[in-house]
Amino acid sequence: MPLLPNMETSDYLDILWRRKWYIVFSILLILFAGSVYSVVAPEKYKSSTTILVIPQRVPEGYVRSTISSRVDDRLFTIRQQVMSRTRLLLVMEELGLYKEERKKFPAELVVEKMRKNIDIQVASATGAGRRRDSGEDAFTLTVTHVNPQLAMLTASRLASYFIDENMKSREQQAVGTSEFLESQLQRTKVRLEKQEEKVKVYKLQFMGELPQQLQANLQILSRLQDQARTNSDAIRTAHDRKVFVEAQLGVLEGQARAIAAAQRSSRETGSDVPIGPDDPEGSLANQLLAKKSQLAALSVRYTDQYPEIRRLKEEIPQLEKRIDVVRRAGGSSGIPAGDPSLPPTTPSQLTLQGTGPRERDEILRLRAQRVSIDSEIASLNREQGGIRKSITELEARVEKSPRREQEMVSLTRDYENLKLSYDDLLKKKLDAEVSQNLEARQKGEQFQILDPADLPQKPFSPDRPKVFGTAFAAALLIGFGGAIGFELINPTLRGKRDFQHFFQVQVLASIPRIRDTEYEAKKNKELSIVYSALISFGALVTVFLVVFGRKIRSLLLGIIS
């Protein structure tokens, strides 16, 4: 029947008394079940080992490792390798694990069972935070097995696999990085050499027109222009000297011709006229010719306002007047130098008879000087032609420099890019080789066992105190709670209070239950004996299982095996 409002403690005790056998049997049954589970359930042992991640021993400021993956990522990869089917089957064969299971079940199921018994936990956040501050990490490897010795051996073996795989993985990554950089370096080197050859051929082909030679070409061009101007001045000076020498030579040759003509005339007429270099008219004629030659030479270089030119222009007319006066006064038969009536004189035709030794030497010296000046002028003209040709070539090179510069920009841009790429790859390749050597010498990041796998002394499962505590709490809940529940769903009315609660009718009288006291007493006694026997048996079995559970379990395992 439903619980009534305002029930007293005695009412609850009546309910529990009515359901006493249910409560007792429920509690005993649950405790018995817990005892049987504690005995029958296989004992499992845990063996754990802690692996410390030691950072790189050489400071990264000196050697930078090429392995940039995080410990968590690498740990995940290594875990997949260690927990692979091949590796776990190898461990099973080596340590003799799961022999019966491997005979009865497929390998995949046994491997999956072993995986479930292996747990890897990274260090807690607090501890991991402290270790990261010091540059270290750690993780714990736990193996669960029914045999404590095998649990310890399996944890130790798997830990060694983790250490070996980490070293192998890091070394493979370092070698792979080095090989990749080597291949890229060789490819870049081939391209760089091809580009260098292109630049070399281009420079040889257009040598002298290259942009970097522009300044040198301009300097050479400026020097050649200065040399050309100097050469022009030298040619002009040589011409002036030649004019002056020819003027002097003309005066002396004119005197020689006049003397020779006078001598011929005197021989023909039989007169004895003194004709020679001391003749006043010849002296004045020589002065006139010298001044005219000097005037011609100065006129080439200076203007008419030059003082010396103005002086010569004033003196030349005066000399001409004096020569005319001498001719009229003395009636000299000498022929003035430069008379157009005389045929032109050549060095081979001129006769030096009648002249003095000094005049002859002077004429010969002036002739040799004239020949030398002619040779010098010819040499200067040839040199001037070469200079003009060089200037033309340099001007052409300077004009082509902008175009060559644009072409060189394209060539050098590709070359510089390849050169930078090659230098960068070469530096990375050298760093990768150092990093590879670092890993080969085991100076890089490593896994080291901090706490070796221990031999567990007590099983962690089943936790018998926890099992019995849970079973006792469940027994009380099910026993007393079930009694209350059965009372709620039972529609039986058990007295005047129950009747008035449901029907709201005034009860005038109630007929008590008529019992056969002897029969009921006998029946209750029999039931009490049966129940007491069952309860005693259950209690004894429970106590027996609790006390001798380990021996019973060992016996069961021996029978099963």
Image (tube, rainbow, N blue to C red):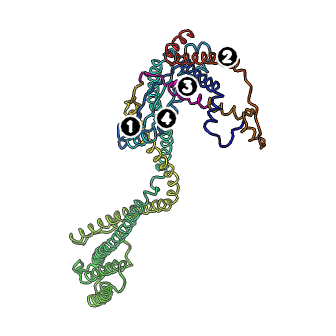
Taking the image as shown, residue 155 lies to the left or right of residue 9, namely: left
- Name the foreground residue: 475 vs 196: 475
Of marks 3 and 1, which one's residue comes earlier in the chain? Answer: 1
**Comes first in the chain, label 4 or label 1:** 1
Residue wearing tag 1: 56
Front one among 348 and 263: 348
Going from the N terminus, do you reach mark 4 or mark 3 first? 4
Numbered label attached to residue 74: 4
Mark 3, secondary structure of its residue: helix
Q: Is residue 515 visible?
A: yes
Question: Residue 252 got which mark?
Answer: none
Q: Amino acid at mark 2?
A: Lys
Mark 3 and mark 2: Cα distance apart in space: 62 Å
Q: Does dot 2 land on a helix, a strand or a loop?
A: helix
**Picture residue at 59% right of the left edge, 30% below the top:** 476
Sequence-wise first label, 2 or 4? 4
Please name the amino acid that badge 3 sits on: Arg
Question: Which residue: 46% across, 40% down?
Answer: 68
Q: Residue at x 77, y 39 (%)?
A: 508
Quarter of the C terminus within the rendering? top right
For the N terminus, give its image quadrant: top right
Residue 99: in magenta span: no
How many marks overall? Answer: 4
Residue 358 is situated, as x and y percent measured from the top left of the image, at 21, 71
